[in-house]
């Protein structure tokens, strides 16, 4: 497909919830967090407690710009640059992030998780159960 086919495409994506977390940009240690799900989407949590992991798709709301090259901070002793698609950099063209995290608890309108690398207020775009 050619780029011209998508020039008029407008994506209408709305958050399904938000992240309550003590994780901050630049932290190496991941934290526990609560994913708050908006009322109109809570039925989607039905039977999620049968899984151990979820993939959280979210929006990097703290970043407005992007770079096509990035220097990953972890496991990169030479500080080599990589293409942004070979990294987890938040400075991406569409500012979309993905994290696979363990579920600690599922409530009526929330999910408590571990290993969170999302900051307070991060908009959640989608959640998918994982068979890990």
Image (cartoon, rainbow, N blue to C red):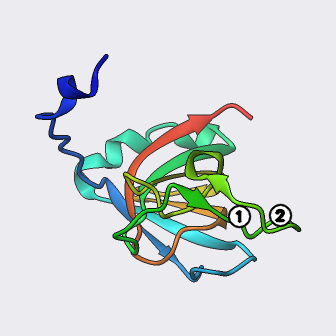
**Going by the image, does 62 lie left or right of 105?**
left
Q: Residue furthest left?
A: 8
Give the residue furthest to the right.
Answer: 77
Q: What's the residue at 74%, 35% (across, down)?
A: 132
Position of residue 21 measured from the top left corner of the image (x, y, whole percent) = 53, 77
At x 65%, y 72%, the residue is 32
Q: Give me the disc on residue 76.
A: 2
Quadrant housing residue 116: bottom right
Work out whether residue 19 or residue 59 is closer to the camera in this orientation and state it.
59
The residue under label 1 is 72
Label 2 environment density (alpha carbons within 10 Å; few <14, some 14–19, many ≥20): few
Q: Judge whether 102 appears above or below 119 on screen.
A: above
88 or 105, nearer to the observer: 88
Q: On the rendered structure, is 42 left or right of 83? A: left
Q: Secondary structure at mark 2?
A: loop
Q: From the viewer's side, name the closer residue of 38 and 63.
A: 63
Please tell me the numbered disc located at residue 107. none
Give the percent coordinates (x, y) of residue 110: 45, 60
Spatial separation of the CA atoms under disc 2 and disc 1: 6 Å
Residue contact at pointers 2 and 1, CB within 8 angstroms: yes
Q: Residue furthest top?
A: 1
**Residue 1, x across and y down, in percent:** 31, 16
Query: What is the x, y in percent for residue 78?
Result: 86, 66
User: How many numbered circles does the render carry?
Assistant: 2
Which element carries disc 1, helix, strand or loop? loop
Which residue occupies 34% across, 49% down? 42
Residue under the point 40% across and 75% down: 62
Give the left or right position of residue 121, taking residue 38 as reference: right
Q: Residues within 10 Å of mark 1 (few under 14, many from 20)?
A: some
């Amino acid at each position: 497909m050619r780029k011209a086919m998508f020039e008029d495409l407008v994506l209408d994506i709305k958050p399904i919830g938000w992240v309550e977390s003590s994780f901050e940009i630049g932290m190496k240690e991941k934290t526990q967090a609560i994913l708050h799900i908006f009322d109109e989407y809570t039925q989607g949590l039905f039977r999620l407690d049968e899984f151990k992991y979820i993939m959280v798709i979210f929006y990097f709301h703290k970043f407005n710009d992007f770079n096509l090259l990035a220097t990953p901070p972890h496991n990169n002793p030479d500080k080599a640059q990589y293409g942004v698609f070979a990294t987890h950099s938040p400075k991406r063209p569409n500012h979309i992030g993905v994290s696979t995290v363990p579920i600690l608890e599922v409530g009526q309108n929330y999910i408590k998780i571990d290993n969170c690398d999302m900051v307070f207020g991060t908009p959640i775009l989608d959640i998918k159960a994982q068979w890990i």
